[in-house]
Image: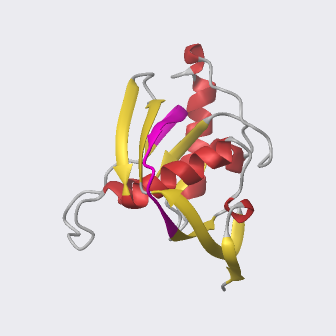
């Protein structure tokens, strides 16, 4: 499943009970992961072009415990529409390749266009961690794992 190019989600399926069930499955898989920041549908056994980013990625101030945790965000049929020429190496890991880490070269900035859970178009410009996540997750949807691109792969326990 992880090596297959995922199928687009038909617009008519957005908001359906079947798609909602898959989104709940993604929430359930991501929730207990202390260091997990995102998950793609193929990682929960669904060959669909959809991923979820953990709400904590969008939290403004990590130290402010009174600040409510933002909701996880779902991106359906995402596509990177722009990418900076400038790239940089970042350490990366994956929930599907446990305890393996490596350096992956990624674009420093990207623009992602997708649909949200309500079928509305969202366009997000990203840099930093979110930019890295977008590229990693779109790779998942294209059947690519970070270990295919990583240098200096190493195991950590």
The x, y position of residue 149, in whole percent, is 69, 62
The residue under the point 67% across, 68% down is: 150
The secondary structure making up most of the magenta span is strand
* Direction from residue 37 to residue 156 in the image, left or right: right
* Direction from residue 40 to residue 125 in the image, left or right: left
Residue 148 lies in what quarter of the image?
Answer: bottom right
The residue under the point 71% across, 83% down is: 155
Q: Is residue 75 magenta?
A: yes
Q: Is residue 70 magenta?
A: no
The x, y position of residue 85, in whole percent, is 45, 50
Decide if residue 105 is in sight here: yes
The residue under the point 58% across, 49% down is: 137
Q: Nearer the viewer, residue 75 or 113?
A: 113
Q: Quadrant of the C terminus?
A: bottom right
Check the image and name the residue furthest to the top.
Answer: 12
Q: Nearer the viewer, residue 89 or 69?
A: 89
The span shown in magenta is: 74-89
The residue under the point 62% across, 37% down is: 22
Report how many numbered discs are placed on residues in the image.
0
- Up-down: is 103 above or below 138? below
Decide if residue 100 is in sight here: no
* Direction from residue 154 to residue 79 in the image, left or right: left
The x, y position of residue 143, in whole percent, is 74, 45
């Amino acid at each position: 499943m992880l090596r297959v190019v995922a199928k687009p989600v038909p617009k008519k399926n957005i908001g359906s009970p079947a798609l909602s069930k898959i989104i709940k499955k993604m929430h359930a898989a991501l929730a207990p992961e202390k260091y997990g920041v995102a998950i793609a549908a193929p990682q929960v056994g669904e060959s669909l072009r959809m991923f979820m980013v953990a709400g904590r990625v969008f939290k403004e101030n990590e130290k402010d415990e009174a600040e409510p945790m933002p909701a996880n965000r779902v991106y359906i049929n995402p596509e990177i529409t722009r990418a900076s020429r400038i790239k940089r190496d970042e350490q990366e890991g994956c929930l599907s390749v446990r305890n393996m880490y490596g350096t992956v070269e990624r674009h420093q900035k990207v623009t992602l266009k997708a649909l949200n859970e309500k079928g509305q178009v969202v366009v997000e410009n990203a840099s930093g961690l979110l930019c890295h996540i977008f590229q990693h997750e779109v790779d998942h949807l294209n059947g690519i794992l970070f270990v295919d691109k990583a240098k200096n792969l190493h195991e950590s326990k």
